[in-house]
Image (tube, rainbow, N blue to C red):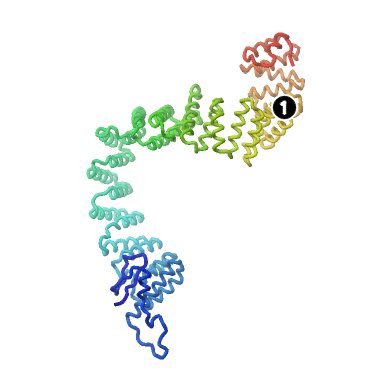
Amino acid sequence: MALKLLLLCQPEILLRKSTAILTTFCLLLALLPATDSFGQRHKKNKKQPERSAKSIAQETEYLFIEAEKLYILKNYARATEVLNKCLALQPDNDVIYYKLAEISNLTEQFSEAEKYITQAIRLNKTNKYYYLLAVDIYTNLGNLPEAAANYEQLIKLVPDAEAYLFSLAAVYLYMQDFDKALATYDRAEKAFGLTEEISYQKQKIFLQQNNLAEAIKESKRLIARYPANSNYVLNLVEILSSNGRYEEAVAELQKLLTDNPDYAVARLQLADIYWKQQAYGKFGDELKLAFNDKGLNLNAKINTVMKYLAYLPNTHLNSLIPQLVDILVIQHPDDHNAYLITGDVYGTLLDKKLVPDEEVEAAKNKAADAYARFVNLDPSNFAVWQNLLNLELQLNRQDSLAVHAQQALELYPNQAWLYLVNGIVQMNKKNNRQAALMLEMGRKRSGSNKGLLVMFYSYLGDIYNALQEYEKSDEAYEAALELDPLNFVVLNNYSYYLSLRGENLDKAKKMSTTLIRNNPDNNTYLDTYAWVHYTLGDYEEANRIFEKIIASGVNEGVYYDHYGDTLYKLGKPDEAVKQWIKARELDKNLENIDQKISQRKIIQ
């Protein structure tokens, strides 16, 4: 009995004209006969005897196995050669044609693949794998009608192949042949009954055809078939809402909520419709009800917040969104994402300047508190640490800033910015030597980050000045200005400290002049400019600037102190004392202020 040729790894494909199946490679080799087809030919016979069918089948089988080995080794060219030898022995063997088509398709020789698979199907019209390969080949050729035709033949000729109706419908959809796609889904419905996939696909097609009535009708059919599935009602509502039929959509949702009052997802959809109708009161009420439902997934709530954040600025949302995130942290106190979205919401409102001035500090505190809770639950997000530390710097939360800055540095020791923050913490504690060490460590980790380097050099200039290491201070300021010549903070501090030391005053004058040319109404910079001129002995110019500062209505004692010193130098001690008295009223900690007043003169 002849051995049957096998397709390795595809046991469903059976060869024609054979009666036995070899299920393993080893068994097949064991059964290969040692006939003249594979050994030496009879040297005495000058004329070859006519070969038997069995001998041809055996050689074909042997060669096919060799081709499979080559195929597994991805030696496709050699595998094709061997398969063509098989074909010469058995020109009507459909499996050989299939294998040649498979290799040609794999090596992107699609025209050759089409030729081979056509022959395979001609010889065997009931093997589903042949049709599936044909579909793949025609898809690669961009011939979708032929791909669809092969699916049609597969479904028609191969038993129990109705599942491929869905693939056929997908091809028709890709071809934008919507009528055939609908007809195919109707066939699938007859085979499998009404399912969610079939109904949703038909609804999409009707909507694509602008046939809203049929889409609604199909959606209602699904609801009638599965009345317990509320998601199908939401799908109908989405169709109605998207097409402006708001009243019908609201009616469907209200009916659903009457039967299922705790179905918070429906409230989100109802709120969306009220938003579209500009019924902002009802919109807010529905969202608050939904957000107060612990059963509603937190991600659904967060996605809702993110959706409406995109509409900012909006008068109604500016006040509503903070209320929603406040509800989140109450309802989901153990979920770090509730605190993350809360911090981000308040941060966004602050960045967009949507918080009233009298509420800014409270909003910053809420954002900082939320971020602090987040990092306590999940310390792995560096961006949140940055937001938290920035807010604590702005709020001057010295104690918590020190704790969080140190925690962040322990977690992220290679983040240069954290050394800056920790350096500032040490500065605020008057630990100037420790601050300098921290800042130097951060500077070395800053790489080519120009903006960060400028900040490090700026603070180092201040620290070294406080440590009276003036050469290092000047070097740091010079390095900062080399990177950023118009850094006003550096220009101000550098020129002011030079004036206090009475050193390099021409440079100080040049820098302070640059300052006020670019910032003519900044009192801090005006004070520096005036004090540089005071140090140079140009009391008239200093006086002119101090008069401008005082006229602006300032309430910082240092300005009145400096103004008094200038008046004294101009020979006006009575007026100087008046300004010193005003300075003391505003700031009792000014150096020598009491002695100046009592002795009516400048105390060095």
Question: Do we see residue 418 in this rendering?
Answer: yes
- Quadrant of image for the N terminus: bottom left
Q: How far across and down, in percent of the image, does residue 38 sit?
A: 40, 80
Residue 540 position (above or below residue 38): above
Q: How far across and down, in percent of the image, does residue 269 sit?
A: 33, 36
Three-letter amino acid code of the residue under disc 1: Gln
Q: Tell me which corner region of the image, top left, top right, bottom left or bottom right, holds residue 448.
A: top right
Q: Nearer the viewer, residue 53 or 535?
A: 53
Residue 20 position (above or below residue 438): below
Q: How far across and down, in percent of the image, does residue 352 sit?
A: 50, 31
Number of other residues with Cα within 10 Å of mark 1, as a class: few under 14, some 14 to 19, many 20 or more: few
Residue under numbered circle 1: 468
Report the number of discs: 1
Question: Do we see residue 316 in this rendering?
Answer: no
* Secondary structure of the residue carrying numbered label 1: loop
Which residue is at a point 28% across and 39% down the rendered structure image?
Answer: 230
Which residue is at a point 42% across and 64% down the rendered structure image?
Answer: 106
Residue 284 position (above or below residue 233): above
Q: How far across and down, in percent of the image, does residue 100 sit?
A: 39, 70
